[in-house]
Structure formats: C-alpha cells, structure tokens
Image (spheres, helix red, strand yellow):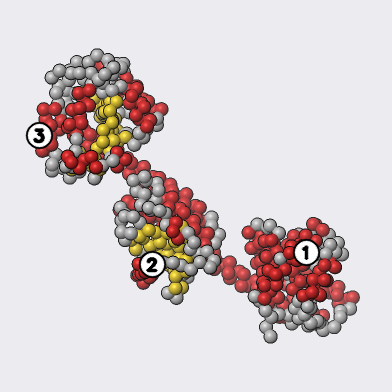
Amino acid sequence: MPKTAAPDQPAVKPEPEDYSRDVDSALSDTRDNDDLIFAEESKSTQFCAANAWKLLIVDDEEEVHAITRIVLEGLTFSGKPLTFLSAYSATQARVILQEHTDIAAILLDVVMETGQAGLELVEFIRNELGNSMVRIILRTGQAGQAPEREVITRYDINDYKHKTELTAQKLFSTVVTAIRSYHDLRTIEQSRKGLEMIIASSRNLFGENSIRQFAAGVLDQMISLLRINEDCLFLHAPSGFAATITDGNIALIAGTGEFHTCGEKGVPPQLDPEITHLLHESVRRKESMFSASAFVQYYCSGSGSETLFFFRLTRALTAWETNLVQVFCGNVAVALDNMYLNQELVFTQKEIILTLGECVESRSKETASHVRRVSECCSLLASLLGFSPQEVKLIRMASPMHDVGKIGIPDAILLKPGPLTAEEFEIIKTHTTIGYHILQSSERPIMRTAAIIAHEHHEYWNGLGYPRGLAGEDIHPFGRITCLVDVFDSLLSRRIYKDPWELERALTYITQEKGKMFDPAMVEILFEHMDVFIATRLRFPDAL
C-alpha cells in the first residue's frame, strides 16, 4: 500500500505492516466485551467533545491517522465515546496538549521532524506540563531509533508497540486499556480531592460559633465539595437550605440559591408540598433520603435536636458521589453534635450567671429583671461602640455579676431603707473588691471579665470613684459601660430607698454627670440611640 506524508512533513519513513486488514474481525471480536459498546454510526456525532474520551494521534503520516480513526470509530467506554485529535508533528502536539488538558491517551510516533521528536514530547508532557494522567502509547516503525528496553526504562510511557505488530485488534485492546487506566487514575484523583475537600471543609465548619453560621457553612462547603469533578456537577443552580424541626414545625435557618432568603428575619419559609413531604418523611424515618431530584441529610443530636440539610439535584447521584456526600456528612454530624453540646454548655453557663446575679438582686430587695436589663443594654452599647462580636458576647454574659460582691454586705446595711452613714457607705463600697476576689481566680474568660466589671463599675471618669480612684481610659471599657448602664437602669427602676424616676429627670442627671461619672463618648451613644435602649428595657419589665 503506498504511503503519503502529511503536507509540510519530512519524507516518508519505511512502510510498516498494514494493520487495517483485521478491522472487520476486530469489530466482531469485541462485541462480547462488557466495557466496549459501539454506538450506531448516525448517533456518534451527537456526543460533544467535552463529554468524550480524547485520543491524540501524533504521527507524520496522514494514512496512520485515517486508519486509526477507521479502526476505532464508534468505540465507547463507560458510556462516553471517543473523539480524535490529530497532530502531524511534535510541535503541533505541544500546542494541542496545552489547549486540551483532559486528553485520555496519546498514540505517539517516535521519528517525526527529528529522530527523537516523540521521546522529547514525552519529556515535555511529563516534566514541563506536569501531566501524569494521560496514557502514552509509543508506536514506531523504526525500532532501531528507539530500542524498547531503553525507552521503557528511561521514559514515562505506558505502552510500546511496533507498527508491524499493531493489528486492528491489538490497537483496540491497547487503546481501551489506556482509557481504562486513565479513567481509574481520574477516579483516584477525584477521590483524593474529595477527601482533601472534606478535611478542609470539616476544619472550616468546626470554626463556626453559632448554629446559623454553621448551617450556612455546611451549605457552602457542600456546594464546593460537589464541584470538585467537572463531570459530576449535579447542583444545577446551587440551591439548598438548612432547617430544624421542633414539634413537627419546620424552621429554616440558612439557605442558598433559590432559598437564599431562608432564615432571614421576617421571611417565612416558602416550600412546595413535595419538599415539605420529603422533609417530614426524613424526620419520620429518622434517616437521610436520596431521590432523583433532591437529597435530605438528617441529623439528630445527642440532646434530641433534629436538623435537616436539603439540596436540589438535576439527576440521581452516582455511587461515588453518594459515598463522598455521606463521608462529608459524617463529619458534619460530629461537628453538629459538638455545636449543640457547646451551645448547651453556653446556655447553662449563662443561666447560672443570671441566676447568681438575680439572687444578689433579690437579697437586696431589688428585681431580678435588673440584671437582665443590664446584660442586654451593656451588650447593645458595646455593639454600638464598635466592639467585636466576641467582646459583645463577653459583656452580655459577664455584666449580670457586677454586684455579686454584695453577698458579703450585712443585711442591716444592704436593706436599710434610709440614707447610709459615712461608715455604712464605706462598707457598701467594699462590694466591688469582694466581687473581684470571688471571680478573679478563675481562668475562664467570662469569669475574668466579670471580675473586671465587678471591680471597676463604680470607677468614675473624673477619678473620684471607687475602689481605686481610676480615671478616664485607665478604667476598663467594660467597667465604664456597666457603670453607665447600671445607673441608667437603676434611676428608672424602683429601689428600697426610692421610687423610679421619670425618663426626663434621669436623662438630666446623666447629662450633668457626663465627663464626671460617665465616659462622654458613651453618653453620646446612649442618647443617640435612646429609643433602642428604652425598647430593650421594656422587654424585661419588673414583676408587679
């Protein structure tokens, strides 16, 4: 059979044996192979290159390209067809390889524009491009130019064939083996990326400090996780939400995509009946559920709290995707359990602190609501002053214990309805140091913060306060905030020694003490947002 070289290529090399003679027999021999399915001729063009195995033919002989296409035309593997790319020189192949990073296999000639062009291309692929996935099949008609033993030992190739031995059947087997290896390597790589994403995602989730933030983090990380494989992007428009179930009622706490308004204040859940049914069914069964159009991940914490994560799908998940989701969700379950446990500990700690503060107030015949109002108004003022969320949380938790030292003050003085003598007032003043000594030995941030507040909430801006006579910014900001809020609420509240003041009278007093008792900047913020502080006080009225 006469040979023709591709245009502008070097002279034709010695002619290899014609391997097209076995095309018909090869086609029949492969019908029983489970992995090999040949599509109808008319349908083969329906597949796009993006959803096909790419085979790059690198050879300077036009006829080699034509025969290879004839032999392999119609071949599919794992439901994906073969698409062909052609290069007639190593130089052309370099360009194609840089443009197509997802080539599955290369049929590579050795001798083209130079006697070592093919081998140099192998080094370019492995070393410069860093492509270790593509399977390289070296075929040569001049074995003397590239001795097999030397090539196999030195170069990272996956198969070596003499053109004289490469019949149609062997070509089929060689290419299918290469594609299968590429497919397996890609699966391993996807699994590795998936595990890395799970580890990274789980680490991010454990850093969240609220159930709402945690839920939003799970949604984001799950979407990122499912994007790791370009062939497995099954979230058409990333849509999902997180919800809790209480007494059969669904409460949405976070959402993404079409559900992005879920969890926002004042936005009711808008769920179609099919989704609602799926959620309730998951709760009834106490298990996660997968369907062709959605999946629901169900969690039940050790305390009995039930949480659901819902995602829309555009198709059913593959076994690999389902396994990846389940591994990730296993980590989410651990994180969620820890989150609920931590939340329970925080609530318990807060309840103990409030109870302790209320006991002190009750002993002095003052209302328990005072410590709650101080707590909320202190955190509000700290937030308006630009304190960090963590600092706002600390002062909310710690400020109820500002008067804990009063447990060391005798009842005769603490409960005296009339004016105190100078000696009695000196004893009352010791409640700041008593409270400090009670709290300061703890290593817990809340207790240490409470110790500071107990010690400094009677220090005055002008330095005339007690117990240490601190002035200005030498007083801890938490002490200054609690000083202002405590006086503000006390003036407006009934005490054993006085009736509640009218708001106007209280504000006049605070104005007079601005720059004396109180930090001027804090007074400005209090006055600027007075309506919010009044509304906060009204949430915790005194018992009649």
The image shows residue 39 at horizontal and vertical percentages of 18, 42
Looking at the picture, how far across and down is residue 406, in whole percent?
76, 75
- Residue 321 seen anywhere in this rendered image of the structure: yes
Q: Name the residue under label 2.
A: 272
Sort mark 2 into few (<14), some (14-19) or many (20+) by Cα contacts within 10 Å: few
Depth check, mark 3 against mark 2: the one in front is 2
Residue nearest the viewer, comparing 108 with 257: 257
User: On the rendered structure, is 289 left or right of 443?
Assistant: left
Res 25 label: 3
Mark 2 residue type = Asp
Q: Which residue is more in the foreground, 239 or 117?
A: 239
Q: Name the amino acid type tagged 1.
A: Val
Q: Relative to 245, is 55 above or below?
A: above
**Between 535 and 432, which is closer to the camera in this rendering?**
535
Quadrant holding the N terminus = top left
Residue under numbered circle 1:
523
The answer to which quarter of the image holds residue 506 is bottom right
Q: Position of residue 500 (x, y in %)?
A: 77, 80
Count residues near mark 1 (Cα–Cα under 10 Å), then give few for <14, some for 14-19, many for 20+.
many
Residue 22's disc number: none
Relative side of 499 to 71, left or right: right
Question: Residue at (48%, 59%) from the top-left corner?
Answer: 260
Contact between labelled residues 1 and 2, with CB atoms less than 8 Å apart: no
